[in-house]
Image: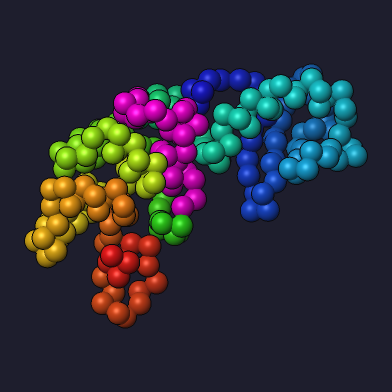
Amino acid sequence: MLGRSLACPLLTFDSQSRLSFSTPNIATATPNIAHLNVNFSGALPSHVNQGAWTSHFLCKKWIIHSSAQIGNLTLSDGDKKTWETCREALSAFEFSLKEKDKILGKAFGHVHSPYWGEERKQEVPKFEIVSDILDYLRGLGLSDDDLYKLVKKFPEVLGCSLEHDLRTNVQILEKDWGIKGKSLRNLLLRNPKVLGYNVDCKGDCMAQCTRCWVRF
């Protein structure tokens, strides 16, 4: 749905949880709806032309349902194809289209996640990155059913570094803690965030608790 092109208003979000529509300069559009703020109560501002709102309602509704989970995402045609390809990388699991978009959005900075804090910049996911991470996790003995649970619980794993996060942390778990095989599988299903730990404050807080080994 991200690749679909419609002559519809653009949906954006502001910090106060309001929906904001900006209408393109179309000959049939009325000046009064050039910029329309709609809150979730459903009430319309008094200056909105009711006829114009009715004529655009279906179009706006489609945008809300198709992109509400991924915020202010603007992609070129090439990036849309890349995004859609990454959806296919998740096709082995029973995620809905919205769930796939939310997973990719959280992993790559398009949906805010407390896990990343403010450090995660938006980027377009790459099929090779997503596929390589899933293949690596399969190699640890996780089934597709296991991966479904892990990714649903910790979608950010797809945005972690395979070399610097996942491989490094699995080695730490095996060498320092003796956790491998079935024990590793059980740990990852219980606490998949351990795959993304990259800080060890050793008791001296570094304010990066979501990615700190102190949580292990």
Q: Nearer the viewer, residue 46 or 68?
A: 68
Residue 109 among those drawn in magenta: yes
Q: Give the range drawn in magenta.
A: 87-113
Q: Which colour scheme is used?
A: rainbow
Q: Is residue 75 shown left or right of residue 155?
A: right
Q: Is residue 63 in view?
A: yes
* Whether residue 79 can be seen here: no
**In this image, 186 relative to 6: left or right?**
left
Work out which residue is located at the far right of the displayed protein and give it.
46
**Image position of 139 (left or right of 81):** left
Considering only vertical position in the picture, is 22 above or below 117? above
- The residue that appears at 28% across and 65% down in the rendered structure is 216
Q: How many labels does the image show?
A: 0
Query: Could you tell me residue 75's position as x and y percent?
Result: 47, 32
Residue 102 magenta-drawn?
yes
- Residue 40, located in which quarter of the rendered image? top right
Going by the image, does 32 lie left or right of 159? right
Front residue of 64/95: it is: 95
The residue closer to the viewer here, 32 or 159, is: 159
Q: Reply above or below: 148 against 17.
A: above
From the top left corner, tell me how far across and down residue 58 is, in percent: 71, 21
Residue 140 position within the rendered picture, expressed as x and y whole percent measured from the top left:
16, 43
Residue for point 51% across, 35% down:
74
The quarter holding residue 60 reads top right
Q: Looking at the picture, does residue 192 appear above or below residue 12?
A: below
Task: Look at 90% across and 39% down and name the residue there.
Answer: 46
User: Could you tell me which residue is drawn at 29 percent across and 74 percent down?
Assistant: 201
Query: Residue 180: image x %, image y %?
Result: 13, 52
